[in-house]
């Protein structure tokens, strides 16, 4: 089977989106903060949300914590109709002069079965600004239509970077993957080209990775299948690991089936330079490739890639 090669690049702060609420002066003595939170939580519930994550972070670096909430929709649990499932929302709250303020909110515009969930990969000082940033990812399984095959779910992940911008004095969210992968031609282990449903599934997967996904609010990103975050001493800091999964459809249906299941690997090194998060693209010349048999667990593949990260960063060649 031909070896699959993937490459990509991460660039921070390329496209800022979300809703940032400017601080407004208020008159009078603020009520106790606990009472303000009770009212805000009631309002959140009335809007059809459930709080699933609460974290206090040093996002502004001024000694005053920012509260991060991840909200899951409670209204609408079906994939059609006016109350179709919404994607999870990120909110940031600040306390200024004793007043609680919703300072930022972002929710992908996708609704229905393509609703996206949010996971936190890191809340450390990734860019070495002296305050925390949030590295997270939106994930989901939108249905795609494959000619000759039908409608199939396709897993995708979109890494995003949430931070405080000192220059504009506001929170920003940026999609990190701004280049599509370079995908090698995949063939059967006997050298023959993919055919039939195998070729159709593979081409559909390639098309997904070669087109930007619109999260709304001006945020557009290329996608990966799975992503993980870690640190590497030899690599000089944090690294983001990504897999591109290309599934050719008919594996395991018959004895001797040679349909490939391809996990293309990509790795990006995140470094700080003049206060801007940057990344170095790195292509691997070997991939976790299975010609037949059970699916390779993405978490296992990411752990293996992480264990080899030092060598990859140094030479980009396993």
Image (tube, rainbow, N blue to C red):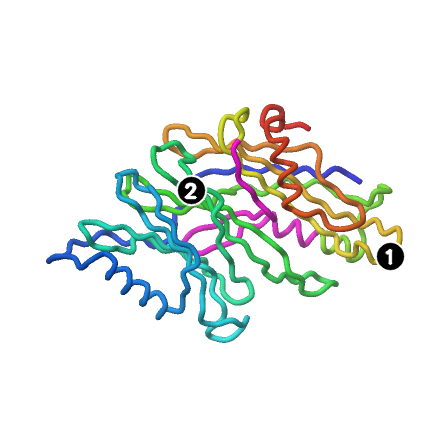
Residue 295 in magenta? Answer: no
Rendered residue at 42%/42% (across/down): 123
Q: Residues within 10 Å of mark 1 (few under 14, many from 20)?
A: few
Residue for badge 2: 123
Rendered residue at 47%/38% (across/down): 11
Image spot of residue 293 (x, y percent): 80, 50
Residue 217 in magenta? Answer: yes
133 relative to 36 in the view: left or right: right
Image spot of residue 67 (x, y percent): 33, 50
Q: Residues within 10 Å of mark 2 (few under 14, many from 20)?
A: some
- Closer-to-camera residue (18/29): 29
Image spot of residue 269 (x, y percent): 52, 32
Which part of the image, by quadrant, shows the N terminus? Answer: top right
Residue 274: name its quadrant. Answer: top left
Residue for badge 1: 254
Separation of disc 2 and disc 1 at Cα? 46 Å
Rendered residue at 59%/59% (across/down): 141
Task: Provide the secondary structure element on which disc 2 rests.
Answer: loop
- Closer-to-camera residue (156/305): 305
Q: Residues in magenta?
A: 203-231
């Amino acid at each position: 089977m031909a070896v699959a090669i993937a490459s990509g690049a991460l660039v921070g702060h390329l496209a800022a989106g979300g809703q940032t609420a400017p601080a407004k002066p208020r008159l009078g003595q603020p009520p106790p903060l606990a009472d303000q939170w009770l009212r805000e939580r009631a309002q959140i519930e009335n809007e059809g949300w459930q709080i699933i994550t609460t974290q206090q972070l040093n996002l502004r670096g001024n000694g005053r914590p920012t509260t991060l909430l991840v909200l899951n929709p409670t209204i609408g649990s079906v994939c059609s109709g006016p109350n179709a499932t919404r994607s999870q929302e990120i909110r940031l709250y600040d306390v200024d002069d004793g007043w609680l303020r919703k300072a930022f909110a972002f929710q992908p515009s996708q609704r229905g079965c393509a609703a996206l969930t949010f996971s936190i990969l890191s809340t450390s000082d990734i860019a070495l600004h002296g305050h925390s940033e949030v590295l997270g990812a939106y994930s989901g399984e939108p249905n795609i239509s494959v000619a000759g095959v039908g409608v199939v779910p396709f897993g995708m992940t979109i890494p995003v970077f949430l931070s405080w911008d000192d220059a504009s004095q506001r929170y920003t969210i940026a999609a990190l993957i701004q280049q599509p992968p370079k995908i090698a031609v995949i063939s059967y282990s006997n050298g023959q080209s993919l055919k039939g449903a195998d070729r159709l599934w593979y081409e559909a997967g390639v098309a997904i990775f070669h087109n930007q996904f619109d999260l709304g609010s001006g945020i557009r990103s290329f996608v990966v299948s799975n992503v993980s975050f870690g640190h590497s001493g030899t690599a000089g800091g944090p690294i983001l690991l990504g897999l591109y999964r290309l599934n050719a459809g008919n594996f395991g249906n018959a004895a001797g089936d040679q349909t490939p299941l391809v996990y293309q690997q990509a790795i990006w090194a995140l470094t700080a330079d003049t206060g801007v998060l940057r990344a170095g693209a790195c292509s691997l010349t070997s991939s976790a490739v299975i010609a037949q048999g059970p699916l390779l667990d993405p978490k296992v593949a990411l752990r293996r890639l992480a264990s080899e990260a030092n060598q990859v960063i140094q030479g980009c060649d396993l």
